[in-house]
Amino acid sequence: MPRVRFDELLAVYRNTEFGADDEPSRLTVATADLAALLTRLEADEAAAEDTDVALLDEIGDVAVGSVVRVRIGSPRVGLGVLARDVDMLLAPPAAKMREPASYYLVDPPYASADPSAPEVIGRYRKVLELVALLSEVATFQDATRAELVLVKDEKIVMPVRYGADDLARLDVAAADRLLTQMADELHRDQKLEILFEALVDLCAGQQAAGRFQFILRNLGELGDAVRKGYRLFASNFSYSKIRSEIEDARIEFAQKIHKTIVDVQGQLLGIPVATVVVASEMKAPTACGAEPWVNRAVLIGAWIFVILLTVAIINQLLTLNVIKSEVDRQKEKLRSDFPAVSDDFVKTFDSLGCRIWWHRVGLCVVILIGIGALLLANRTYEHIAAIPQPACEVAPSLSDQ
């Protein structure tokens, strides 16, 4: 027989008038499903043990609309939690760190799946948000013992202990201010460090058992300490400082981009010189002249020049790729570190990207010009080489005279 689900048990809890600890409770059998569940529990010993619900009257007295006496205890831990009040709900240490997945609260009546929660549950959940925040700040945490540990000059143990009275006295507005301030991702790491220091200062002089309750009673003071610490941090970090750092980065990147042209400027200026040399040095062969060898040497020199120029320009293109990657990384870092002001400075990096693109285009055009000039030199050489060389005439010797 399948085990009882917690949502089936909720029908029992919702229709029960709970008695004192030693007195039986009175259950109104409101529906046929509820009557069937009681019959099932009476017949299935394992289900009755899981739910810890026992019928004290005869099973024959169970009918829709009847009121029967029952004994209701705590169900199996894996099934859910039945709590007579908030203090009973918070009795397990784990419940102080995380809300149980399935539970029913008798006073005030509330189930964890209900759409609207009473005020005390809202306060409970607000404290759990604070616990999650402090767990993020703590050096480490022990969830099973519900303890947070802060380690600075010494080890400070903060047991997470609170009850219904602490929830009733909770300053919800102060809790919301602190949570809202820490929720902003801008300088969150620095804020967590400031909160850590404020926690250490606030609870170091308190007895360990009451440290968390002391924090709950002084959330306003804790929030003020965090705000003051953040103002002190922000005084050393301003919009103008960001702007100055971005401008310094822009100048540095611009110099690197400019250097990619300067480094090959000599080779670039050599293109028209080499063209003139090729055009002027290649000559038609004459009788007994060395023009063919000169022409070959000029062509070989042109090839060497274009090859070296291409290697140099490819190296500069690779350098531009590295610079582009660094520009993109700095842009993403700006967006992640300063999302509130990043849009004001992204255009600076976009202009650098545009400049890099034009430099790439310019270097590629230079390679094409060099290759075109080389093809022209080859064509010129082929044209001159096709000209027949006149026969070399040897002067008559004196013996022939």
Image (cartoon, helix red, strand yellow):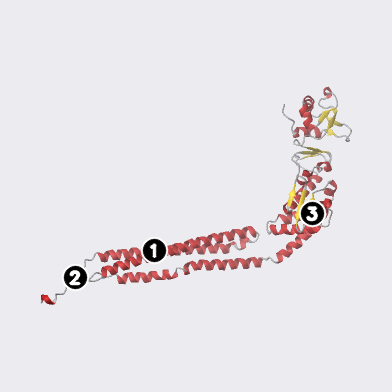
Which amino acid is tagged 3?
Answer: Ala
User: In the current view of this chain or complex, which residue is farthest to the left?
Assistant: 401
- Location of residue 110 (image quadrant): top right
User: Would residue 115 be found to the left or right of residue 273 on screen?
Assistant: right
* Residue 252 image position (x, y, % from top left): 56, 67
Q: Which of pointers 1 and 3 indicates the residue nearer the eye?
A: 1
Quickly name the residue at label 1. Answer: 307
Q: From mark 1 to mark 3, how far is it between C-alphas?
A: 73 Å
Q: Residues within 10 Å of mark 3 (few under 14, many from 20)?
A: few
Q: Residue at x 75, y 61 (%)?
A: 227
Q: Looking at the image, is 105 positioned above or below residue 182?
A: above
- Location of residue 377 (image quadrant): bottom left
**Local SS, label 2:** loop
Q: Residues within 10 Å of mark 1 (few under 14, many from 20)?
A: some
Q: Is residue 33 visible?
A: no
User: Would residue 6 be found to the left or right of residue 267 on screen?
Assistant: right
* Residue 343 image position (x, y, % from top left): 61, 60
Q: Is residue 201 visible?
A: yes
Numbered badge on residue 173: 3
Frontmost residue, 235 versus 150: 150
Q: Looking at the image, is 298 positioned above or below residue 19?
A: below
Frontmost residue, 35 versus 85: 85
**Local SS, label 3:** helix
Quickly name the residue at label 2. Answer: 392
Q: From mark 2 to mark 3, how far is it between C-alphas?
A: 109 Å
Do the numbered discs 1 and 2 sit on residues whose CB atoms are within 8 Å?
A: no
Which amino acid is tagged 2?
Answer: Cys
User: Would residue 225 be found to the left or right of residue 327 on screen?
Assistant: right
Q: Residue at x 77, y 39 (%)?
A: 103
**Local SS, label 1:** helix
Which amino acid is tagged 1?
Answer: Ile
* Residue 75 image position (x, y, % from top left): 79, 34
